[in-house]
Amino acid sequence: MDLLNTLVEKGLRRELPTREEALAVLATSDDDLLEVVAAAGKVRRQWFGRRVKLNYLVNLKSGLCPEDCSYCSQRLGSTAEILKYTWLKPEEASKAAAAGVAGGAKRVCLVASGRGPTDRDVDRVSRTIEAIKEQNEDVEVCACLGLLSNGQAERLRAAGADAYNHNLNTSEGTYGDITTTHTYADRVDTVRQAQSAGLSACSGLIAGMGESDADLVDVVFSLRALDPDSVPVNFLIPFEGTPLAKEWNLTPQRCLRILAMTRFVCPDVEVRLAGGREVHLRSMQPLALHLVNSIFLGDYLTSEGQEGKADLEMIADAGFEVEGAGTTTLPEHRAGGCGPCGDGQAAAGACADLSDRTPAATAAGGEEPPAGNDPAARRDLVAVRRRGAGTDLAPNA
């Protein structure tokens, strides 16, 4: 297929595809799916070999969030029966993190619900980071605390944080449809604050919220322009008790096409298979390892993932290997400067300011999303987390 040959060549050169090419990936048929995976797999292996980085989530504070993000089980007004608790003590969080590290995780992600941290919260998280680093000196620590105020990113960096996560989630043109209590621009500003403080930026998306193909392409192109080091791709977990509980729009095949498109647009970035993989990819999860180079080990913030042992077996059975602590994840050329940009003219816009980007509504092409209430919905796979942080039960790692 000429399209795939072109995308592989561009990916190996770190050259930005056109929007039409990205849309075409999402429009490929199921008959062509293995060819799409194989092509994107060539790009993945060029920059990351057969390594899979493991990440482990610790939910520092669960539920009772004042924001109204429609996809979130912790949102204002959610009736999802999730765990609700206030801040874990540093020693409790460190113990939870240690379980993930023992399971093979190279990065620990510290997450707290809420609009953003107070200065007192930053002090609390800083003590937690220090406690984790004392026990596991080589582990990477990523904080995800919401919108940052001036100076907070610098304080987290000084405490030992390596990265900061704040997802764009969806296209700028449709952002107001899923959240009204903050803006897309607020999210962009927080990612830029993290980058300015010297933190590795982690920013990604959520697919399956009713968006069109054009929306997906728009947010992934915006992420390329923002230039994070890590791009987590989440698939909506439709929690009962949230506004998007009936949005069962994804199939395993569509998930794989979304991951392939993300890899072609962000060829040398850590693309992470994140929340919802068990729910929507199901038995096709191993194929996704040919597209991504990073996954979460075990459970998520408020939902349970598959057993950590099963994750490790899946990686080994698919012919991949867990990335060790002594290995640098990103290619050497991303150590500084504008990582994704190639030498070609087509890549010249990759580092353009996001304010120059048009919203998804103006993007050409792209099918409309399928209707909700998919008969293939697997509500039985949406399991609320009842173990690990905030409970007396051992974590899954």
Image: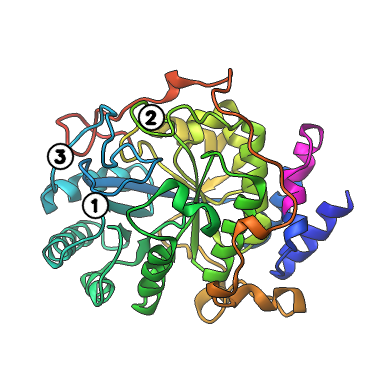
The circle on residue 204 is: none
Residue that extends furthest to the right in the rendered view of this protein: 2
Task: Please say if the residues under marks 2 and 1 sit with CB atoms less than 8 Å apart.
Answer: no
Q: Give percent across and percent down for residue 321.
A: 54, 46
Q: Residue at x 24, y 77 (%)?
A: 151
In three-dimensional space, the C-alpha distance between marks 3 and 1, rounded to whole angstroms, equals 12 Å
The circle on residue 85 is: 3
Left/right placement of residue 141 relative to residue 10 reads left
| Residue in the foreground of this view, choosing between 185 and 336 | 185
Q: Give percent across and percent down for residue 381.
A: 44, 23
In three-dimensional space, the C-alpha distance between marks 2 and 1, rounded to whole angstroms, equals 19 Å
Q: What residue type is labelled 1?
A: Gly
Give the extent of the magenta segment: 23-36
Q: Is mark 1 on a helix, strand or loop?
A: loop
Residue 20 falls in image quadrant: bottom right
What crowding class fits label 1: few (fewer than 14 Cα within 10 Å), some (14-19), or many (20 or more)? some
Report the mark closest to the observer, 3 or 1: 1
| Residue in the foreground of this view, choosing between 294 and 61 | 61
Question: Which residue is denoted by mark 2 in the rendering?
Answer: 239
Q: Residue at x 61, y 50 (%)?
A: 216
